[in-house]
Amino acid sequence: MNGLIPIPELRASLLTALLLLHASPVMLANRLAALLEPVRRVSPLWLYVVVLEMLIGGDLVLIAPGLRPVAWPTLALAVIVGLLGGGLGFWLDQVVTTSLRKASRGASRPLRRLAPVLGYSPSWGAVISLNPLLAADATGSTMARTLLTRGEFLPPLVVVVGILEEIIYRWAFPWLLGCVLPWQGLLGLLSGLMIANLFYGLIHLAFGGRTIFTRWLLGLLFAALVLVSGSVLAASMAHGLFNWLAMKATLAERRGSITFVRSHPGGS
């Protein structure tokens, strides 16, 4: 591995830490927000951006890639593919999420009959609920509840989050994995992308299992955009557009559920 750290033991320690952090940047941002709360309230979304930037820096220190200028036709193709991919990703997310919601309604009916026998559990109710606020409470997600109830959706910041996630999970982290995996060439690249995509799905653990699955599917789409266009710019454009569209849709849905938010325990 060609990096900026010449000491093998230090490289191994940093690699281990980065592998753990790549699976939990949302959790880390939540914990930092909780620690800072007594001193000053800081939005977890801002802290999440800081954590993502730190991960990118750590990846680059380990792999020290040689950056080359990209030809403008490649950049133009990446922009076009990215914008189309963002719209396609949003449509795909809506279709899959709607299908999963319908399936969960049917699956949860017979399971509810077990409640008098097994006892009621707030977390179980949150799992089968279709309301993301319940899921946020059950998982202790400060970020999820903050975003959904306080409306801290700053459009530029939401777009930046998507771009940074793509730089990490579709470029820097797969590159890092390619340096340590036993496979080389195309097989190493694909293996790195698939493993990084698994990590990308897991970082959405705080938003529930359905979100993990849908983000994993989106990650496959974004990885395909990188392979088709030859540039991570396509995935970054697609993810930024997707986040902006998802933000608009979530805010519209939030306005419709404001009654629930006010009556729900802990709601604002």
Image (tube, rainbow, N blue to C red):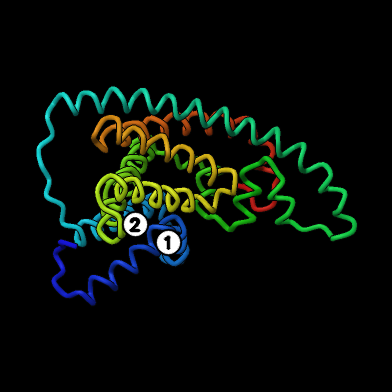
Q: Position of residue 49 (x, y in %)?
A: 34, 50
Going 42% across and 39% down the picture, which residue do you hit? 220
Which amino acid, by three-letter code, is at mark 2? Val
Horizontal and vertical percent position of residue 70: 13, 34
**Residue for point 36% across, 22% down:** 84
Judged from the image, the secondary structure of the residue bearing numbered disc 2 is helix
Q: Which secondary structure lies at badge 1?
A: helix
Q: Are marks 2 and 1 in contact (CB under 8 Å)?
A: yes
154 relative to 210 in the view: left or right: left
Q: Dot 1, how many residues are within 10 Å of its Cα: few (below 14), some (14-19), or many (20+)?
A: some
Mark 2 and mark 1: Cα distance apart in space: 8 Å
**Which residue corresponds to mark 1?**
28
> Toward which corner of the image does residue 42 lie, by quadrant?
bottom left
Number of numbered discs on residues? 2
Left or right: residue 102 versus residue 197 is: right
Which residue is depicted at the point 47% across and 33% down?
A: 247
Residue positioned 25% across, 58% down in the render: 179
Task: Determine which residue is flagged by label 2.
Answer: 51
